[in-house]
Image (cartoon, grey):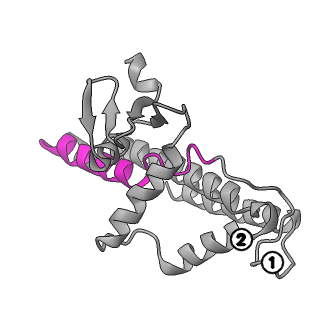
Amino acid sequence: MADKDKPLLIKRYASRRLYNTETSDYVTLEDIAGFIRDGREVQIIDLKTGDDLTRQYLLQIIAEHESRGENVLPVNVLNDLVRAYMLPGGGVMPQFLQKSFEMLRESQARIMENMNALNPMSKMPGFEAIQAQQQAFLKAMTAGLGSQWSGPGQEGADDEGGKGGGSAEDLEAIRKQLAELQEKLSRMS
């Protein structure tokens, strides 16, 4: 159980093959994506240099899924991400995304708890299987996303492609809106 709490260590050899240190076998990017969907954090290290390659490989997994037509990120979000990388200091996008995913996971957990407590269908045979499928779906939608974001960013940086106007006030306004949405979700459940 304790092994599930620490990241799964994957070593990249000079041949670019990826080696799972827990199972002592080689893995593919799709295998790594499966570990993440199952809720496991991963850490990918270059064996020769010791460099952490995790971010690079996670971005590659997302790019491959997007190129296969599994569009998770709308074009406007991709544009905003590119803009965020072009801003001096990285803007507020990394912190915003991290907080948004944290709130999403918390809200989904509360929804699942309330669904269990209030749903009269929970007594029906087979309900647990349906519930497990729903939890797996929610987990797949959010697993690993935003929880390890450590990109550049500073409060008060511009958030509109360098046009000015971005400030700590804007960040505070976004936080307030997210808090209001979270409060509405809480009242609904």
Amino acid beneath label 1: Gly
**Disc 1 target residue:** 162
**Disc 2 target residue:** 86
Nearer-N-terminus badge (2/1):
2
Q: Quadrant of the N terminus?
A: top left
- The label on residue 26 is none
- Dot 2 lies on which element? helix
Amino acid beneath label 2: Met
| Above or below: residue 174 compared with residue 19 | below
Q: Are marks 2 and 1 in contact (CB under 8 Å)?
A: yes
Q: Is residue 185 left or right of residue 14?
A: right
How busy is the neighbourhood of tag 1: few (under 14 within 10 Å), some, or many (20 plus)? some
Who is closer to the viewer here, 116 or 14?
14
| Above or below: residue 59 compared with residue 169 | above
Q: Image point 57% across, 43% down: which residue?
A: 148
- Dot 1 lies on which element? loop
Q: Is residue 102 left or right of residue 57?
A: right
Who is closer to the viewer here, 49 or 105?
49
Question: Is the stretch drawn in magenta largely helix, strand or loop?
Answer: helix
Residue 21 pos. (x, y %): 34, 24
